[in-house]
Image (cartoon, helix red, strand yellow):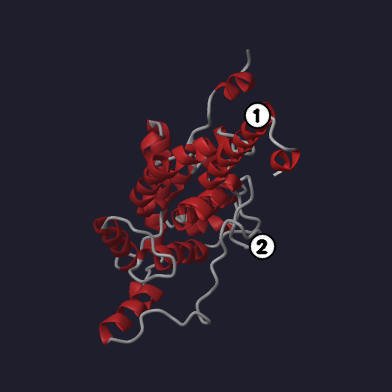
Amino acid sequence: MDRSERSIDRLPTLYEVLARKTKPPVDLFSFYIYMRDQQRSVDYLDFWLDVAQHTSLCRHYVSELRRSILLETPELEKTGSKRSSYILDHMGEMNDPAGPSTDLTTDEKLKDQNLSAFLRQENGNANHSPQGSLGSQQSALRASGDRPFPAAGDRPSRPSFMSRNSPTRTDSGNSPAHTVARADIRASAEKILYTYLLPGSEREVMLPQGIVQDITRDIEEEGRDDPEVFDTAKDYTFQAMERDAFPGFLRAKALGNLVPPSLFLRLVFGLIATTAALWVGYVLIFLDAPKHQRAW
């Protein structure tokens, strides 16, 4: 029996669903619908998908730099130092961002650490000024007592997983369709912070306060935008979905892809009512009841 045949002998894991390695009715689209309609917590899944998208942007950006080095283009100057070039040369293949960082092998963790180390060093060479970032401006507004967030009409719309026209959403290969600039990575990190993590944000997800404070400090004060900034929050969200939502999703699909539990209850009630009606009809026949009573 080959691997593809063995795979149907068990239910998929959350990692396989998020990595788009499964087929309907236990694919990522079905899980998204379940999180939206049944769990009412699709923001957690969207947060996780956006963090995975951010990681893919970082990897694509670094891959382009590596390619420019191999082609000996002027892009080599952007690496900033010989140490940066060494990190790029020894980065290896980029990892699949679908799983939690706790499940990575030692080699995969080393590659991710090298990726974040390179981005931190390059960001330091760029002399980022956190005072000019959107988050710092919002912090100043909060301190002054003004409204901390722009009006709904002024806030850029945030496409969800259901939207396929977003220029920053990756395809099934987790690769953007355009060249990634360094500013895109910074904008992606700030977008995640302002959309999901800051108190009162558009789609705030409930995470431990310590995690939110660490991420806010890393982005706002230290000017970081590497994937390691979100590792703790990403792992926490993955474990929460795996513990609270994914078992119910599998149960719903294993029972014949029934959606709300009320549909199952209605089916049971209908079968009981039909059985009762047939039983009463047979009883009336044996009691030689008039036809108009049996018809009723």
SS type, badge 1: loop
Against 239, residue 48 (above or below) is below
Helix, strand or loop status at disc 2: loop
* Kind of residue at badge 1: Leu
Quick one: 13 or 289, which is closer to the camera? 289
User: Quick one: which residue is furthest to the top in this view?
Assistant: 1
Seen from this angle, which residue lies furthest right? 291
The residue carrying pointer 2 sits among few (fewer than 14), some (14 to 19) or many (20 or more) residues within 10 Å by Cα, namely few
**What is the quadrant of residue 161 in the picture?**
bottom right
Q: Which residue lies at the image location 61% right of the left edge and 54% below the top edge? A: 176
Q: Are marks 2 and 1 in contact (CB under 8 Å)?
A: no
Left/right placement of residue 144 relative to residue 246 reads left
Residue 258: quarter of image: top right
Disc nearest the viewer among 2 and 1:
1
Please give the residue where the numbered disc 1 appears in the rendered image. Answer: 287
Q: Name the residue beneath numbered marker 2.
A: 165
> Could you say where residue 220 lies in the image, as x and y percent from the top left?
33, 68
Amino acid type at circle 2 is Asn
